Amino acid sequence: MPKDFPGRISYILDLYGMSFLRGAWVTMVIATVSTFFGCLIGFAVGVVQSLEADRKDSPLRWFFLGVAKIILYLYVEIFRGTPMMVQAMFIYFGSSVLFGIDMSMWFAAIFIVSINTGAYMAETVRGGILSIDPGQVEGAKAIGLNHFYTMIDVILPQALRNIIPQIGNNLIINIKDTCVLSVIGTVELFYASKGAAGALYTYYEVFTITMVLYFILTFTCSRLLRLWEDKLDGPDNYDLATTDTLLYTSGLYRYRKGSVAVDSQKGGD
């Protein structure tokens, strides 16, 4: 083992470089896929929470809508109010004890992070929906759209632009928080780092490498999301059509009356 710090870093990378890369790959796959499914869950929950019972609706619809909102409210509050590490152990070991379900590493990791992200995204989506001018909903209903198509075609496309920063935040948080999945045996970056540090007793050097890798992952994702956000903003300058093109050009044509060219704006004898 080299005595100097850079030498020890190089030595550790030679021995465990591929292990770090595999751990980083697992971390990125879990974080990206879970954020995607978490967003889908959040959009679904947010849309249901935005439903309002109409006075003309049947009592049965009132009842089921009320029950659904209570269940979703409890889901959001429980998963936002408890640590993901506790949730991981409760779901992973509880599913085995109570239902005899033996989850694979990939399924357990993605499932746990997805439903955790969905709880946060549900409130984000609800806030995004409320940020849209109510006149948009009124206009959609005025042309005959029901609540579902109003959300899909009018409200959610506008809300998406408003909540992209929060989607990016959730992705970055998930990249970092996948480290808690080591408690259920998920071999991600933090788990791989613990193995290397424990084998060589070089905790400072190993976790310096780990910190740099986490920063590279989060910084890259934040830049890519910023590019996506800028892409949705569109160009800075627009060519606005302020007049009807046909009307604008109608006075510029000339026609011949006999052998004399007459301006269409002046007419002719």
Image: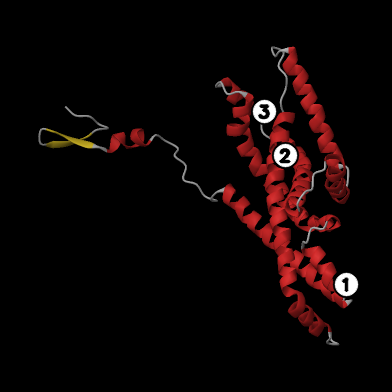
In the displayed orientation, state which residue is furthest to the front. Answer: 100
Q: Amino acid at mark 2?
A: Gly
Dot 3: few (<14), some (14–19), or many (≥20) neighbours within 10 Å? few
**Residue ID at (87%, 43%):** 97
On residue 248, the disc is: none
Classify 153 as above or below 58. Answer: below
On residue 134, the disc is: 3
Point out the image quarter for the C terminus: top left
In the displayed orientation, state which residue is furthest to the bottom. Answer: 3
Question: Distance from label 1 to label 3 (Cα)?
Answer: 58 Å
- Sequence-wise, the earlier of marks 3 and 2 is 2
Which of these two is toward me, 108 or 147? 108
Label 1 sits on a secondary structure element that is: helix
Classify 267 as above or below 92. Answer: above
Viewer-side label of 1, 3: 1
Q: Is residue 149 left or right of residue 11?
A: left
Residue matched to label 2: 42
**Residue ID at (71%, 72%):** 18
Viewer-side label of 1, 2: 1
Residue 91 occupies which quadrant of the picture? Answer: top right
Which of these two is toward me, 24 or 166? 24
Dot 2: few (<14), some (14–19), or many (≥20) neighbours within 10 Å? many
Residue matched to label 1: 198
Residue 61 occupies which quadrant of the picture? Answer: top right
Label 2 sits on a secondary structure element that is: helix
Viewer-side label of 3, 2: 2
